[in-house]
Each structure stands twice: as C-alpha cells, then as structure tokens.
Amino acid sequence: MSIVGSGYVGTTIAACFADVGHDVVNVDIDEGIVASLNDGRPPIHEPGLEELVAEHAGERLRATTDYAAVRDTDVTFLALPTPAEEDGHIDLSVMKAGARSLGAALGEIDGSHVVVTKSTVVPTTTEETIAPIVAEESGMTVGEDLHVGMNPEFLREGSAVADFLDPDKVVLGAGTDRARESLRSTFDPLVEGADDPPVIETGIAEAEMIKYANNGFLAAKISLANDIANICKEYDIDSEAVLSAIGLDHRIGSAFLGAGVGWGGSCFPKDVAAIIAAARDVGYEPAMLEAAVEVNDRQPVRLLERLREYVDPAGARVAVLGLAFKPGTDDIRNSRAIPLVEALSAAGSEIVGYDPVATDNFRARYPDIDYADSAAAALDGADAALVVTDWPEFADLDGEFDGMSTPVVVDGRRIVTRREGIVYESLV
Ligand SMILES: NC(=O)C1=CN([C@@H]2O[C@H](COP(=O)(O)OP(=O)(O)OC[C@H]3O[C@@H](n4cnc5c(N)ncnc54)[C@H](O)[C@@H]3O)[C@@H](O)[C@H]2O)C=CC1
Ligand SMILES: O=C(O)[C@H]1O[C@H](OP(=O)(O)OP(=O)(O)OC[C@H]2O[C@@H](n3ccc(=O)[nH]c3=O)[C@H](O)[C@@H]2O)[C@H](O)[C@@H](O)[C@@H]1O
C-alpha cells in the first residue's frame, strides 16, 4: 500500500501497517522526512513509534518523494493536512495538490487502484473533489478502474501508536465493492491483532461525517463540562465532585469531562470550525457546536478575570506554566497559552513561560517573552502564576512557590495542590 503524507498520521499508520505485515511506501514532498524514515527514524515523537520505524524501515516500510512508487501498490491512503481557512472553512489546497500528483502517477498503470481519504474532510469532499481530480489526472474512471474510500482516523497525539493498533472502532467508508474489499483486507490483520474492535462499514460521506461528529461531540462534551464547572464556581461548589459523579452514569461516561481552560490542539479547533462552516453552507446553523466554541473561547478570559481579582496584570511578572496544548506533547498549535500570552502582553505584563518540552516551539512564535528552564525558575520573583497545561509535574510543585514575590496561583487545570503560604484560586 502507499500512504501519501508522512506527518503525525501518515507515519504512525505506515509503521503500524508495516508492523501487522503490510508492505508500505510513504510518499512525502519533504526530503528530510523521507531521508529520516529511510534511516529508520520517525520525523515525529510518539511513544513506540521509534521502535516500529527502526524495525521495519528498509524492509516492509520505505519512503520516497517520488509519487511513481504508488504504481507498485494497489491502494493509496491520503494522509495530508486539512487546515482551516481564516473563516473556518476547510482548506483543501494540499489535498487537491496530492490528488493531482497521485492521479498523474496513476495515469501510467494498467490495472485498477483504490484511493482512500485518511485525512479529516467535510462530507462529500472525497467523492466530489478528490475522486474527480484523481480521475481527471489519471484518465481513470471512478467505479471502473478507480475505486474510492474514506477511513477516518481517531488517534490522539501522545498515544498515536497505541490508539491506532487498538482502536475503539474501525470505520470503513467505501464507494464500491472493490474499495470495500480492499479496506477490509488492509484492516483485517490489524483488527485480528487488536481487542476485537467493531468494524463499521458505511458509505463515504457517512465516514467523513463520523469523524466530525466524533471530534465535535468530544469538544462539546468538554465545553459542557466547562459550562457546568463555571456554574459550580459561582456557587462555590466543587466542580470536580460534580463532574466525577455525573461521569459514573454510563450514559455520560467519565472521559473528557476534564474542566478547565479548554480545548486546543491541531484538530478540535479546526475541525469544529470546519463542520460549522460546512453546515452553514448547506443551510443549517449548528447552535450546539457554536456554543461549544463560545464556551471554549471564554475560558482563558475567565482565567484572566480570576487573576485580576488578586493582581493587576499591568507591569506584573506573570509565570505561565504549560505552553503545550496538552501534556505529553511539544505541540503548541491552538494551545490555550496562546490567547493568554496575547492578552497578558496587551495588558502590559512581564511574561515568563515554562513548559517541560514545548518551550522551543513557543519561543519560535513568541520570541519576546521570557522563558525559564524549570517551573521553579519561572516562579522565582513572579507576582502571579497561571497554570495552563496539566503536566503531571505541576501537581508536585510545593516549595517552588516560596520564591514568588506574591504567591498568587491561578490554576486553569485544577492540578496544583492547595498549600499553606500561597493564594490559590482555581478557574473551575
Ligand atoms: N494529528 C492528529 O493527531 C490527527 C490528524 N488527523 C487528520 O489527518 C490529516 C493529516 O494530519 P497530520 O498527520 O497531523 O498532518 P501533518 O502536518 O503532521 O503531516 C502532513 C504531511 O504531508 C506532507 N505533505 C504536504 N504536502 C504534500 C504533498 N503534496 N504530497 C505529499 N506529501 C505532502 C507534509 O510534508 C507532512 O509530512 C489531517 O486531515 C488531520 O485533521 C486525524 C486524526 C488525528
Ligand atoms: O482529530 C484529531 O486529530 C484527534 O483530536 C483529538 O486528539 P488530540 O487533539 O491529540 O488531543 P486530546 O487528548 O483529544 O485533547 C484535545 C484538547 O482537549 C483538552 N481536554 C481534553 C480532555 C478533557 O477532559 N479536557 C480538556 O480540556 C486537552 O487539554 C487538549 O487541549 C481526539 O481526541 C482524537 O480522537 C482525534 O483523532
């Protein structure tokens, strides 16, 4: 099989498919990524990925910048980025470029080929945008020698390999029997090795929509938890007690009820924005998803309101603890630290950021704030601390607070333990 795009998803699934016995070729335009993979080193950091790539590179796993490699395979997965445009709409420019290159390469084959969208795309994209481009460039005919499928991905950064190899479900969207058969045989060895996940065979647009429904529901679940936690806060009720109690109802479930400063990352924000924009285009105003975004946008504002109850940010030295969008990653895309740092800068604060692994990425975007190489150093002399990412090490902070000039700690993730000698305020 071929996998076009070798980023978070493309590399993870390539290594995992190789591990379950497939011959895999990764096609990426980035020569550095290709060289690194062929050397046995993954271009991204994910637990377990290094071992898999090292084991299979040069054997069942290889990488190339040359799309011609797809001709020796019978199925190609497109794992290319689908970012959001300024107005929230999905930006399909990279997908279209990939489809063009793929089609041009397929033009020279005799038999048939299956093209599967792995990227998150709004409903109808695969059939109405991707398939026609591949068909036009290749001269193939959809449903005859060109078969199309959609296989959404649910892995999380930080546990990508484990999530892919042991999924809650596998969704196989297919336009023809040939595409369905190809998806089945691709996933059979994985499904057999996993904990018997349900396999949902469905149409292509349904598969596309399942991905947005999944991410939209999870993002909205967090926002609803935040809404409830905000009410608790106003009543001085312990939101954790409330949320953990409702999580015991199996109809609600305890996952993704973590209230705090909200959701970020490379996917929830862009995917919720894209499905809202797509829904409006077809004449529906998705009020719940819009509210999920509104609540999420308010959480950092509320955190600063809490801070202002104790410290005037103008001229204050504020330690921002946690710059990554979630613990366990150096990814800062749509991190909640971003709106906070921008608002603190606008208010005239002197900001010092600290993150166990994401500092370099944050510094590249915000070179003008201070950075510390430990939480203790960030807290030293600070007038206030904002806790933004729930890194486990922040739960152990204790004597480090003694170095603060005024020990005000405003906790956006309810991770710091209250102690004598600090003014502790939680967001929720
Ligand atoms: N990152 C994640 O945790 C998840 C991402 N997704 C979805 O998967 C898709 C891919 O996301 P990521 O892997 O995170 O993207 P990424 O940005 O990490 O990787 C994309 C790769 O595509 C390559 N590329 C760009 N243009 C190309 C072209 N014309 N031909 C060949 N290669 C090209 C880039 O060099 C890069 O290596 C997106 O639709 C995303 O929403 C879905 C589930 C999880
Ligand atoms: O489409 C995607 O790319 C992926 O998006 C998310 O995965 P990811 O963004 O890696 O991270 P999550 O663990 O879901 O966290 C997302 C954000 O929600 C926040 N969060 C999560 C859980 C919670 O209870 N509370 C909460 O605020 C995290 O801090 C983080 O900012 C989904 O969980 C994956 O299933 C999906 O495949």
Image: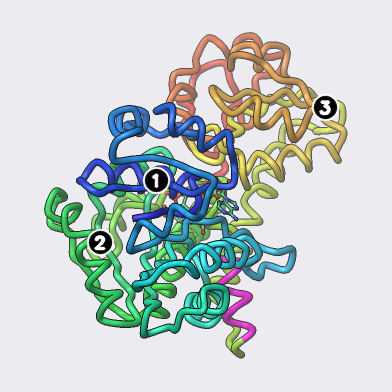
- Residue at horizontal 51%, vertical 59%? 223
Secondary structure under tag 2 reads loop
Q: What label does residue 368 carry, if any? A: 3
Residue 126: x, y in percent?
48, 75
Residue 184: x, y in percent?
21, 67
Classify residue 322 as left or right of residue 304: left
Q: Earlier in the sequence, mark 1 or mark 3?
A: 1
Instruction: Say which quadrant the N terminus sits in.
Output: bottom left
> Is residue 265 visible to the viewer in this orientation of the structure?
no
Classify mark 1: residues with Cα within 10 Å, few (<14), some (14-19) or many (20+). Answer: some
Secondary structure under tag 3 reads loop
Residue pointed to by mark 2: 169
Give the overall secondary structure of the magenta segment: helix
Q: Which residues are magenta?
A: 271-281
Amino acid type of the residue that numbered disc 2 sits on in the rendered structure: Lys
Classify residue 184 as left or right of residue 259: left
Residue 352: x, y in percent?
72, 23
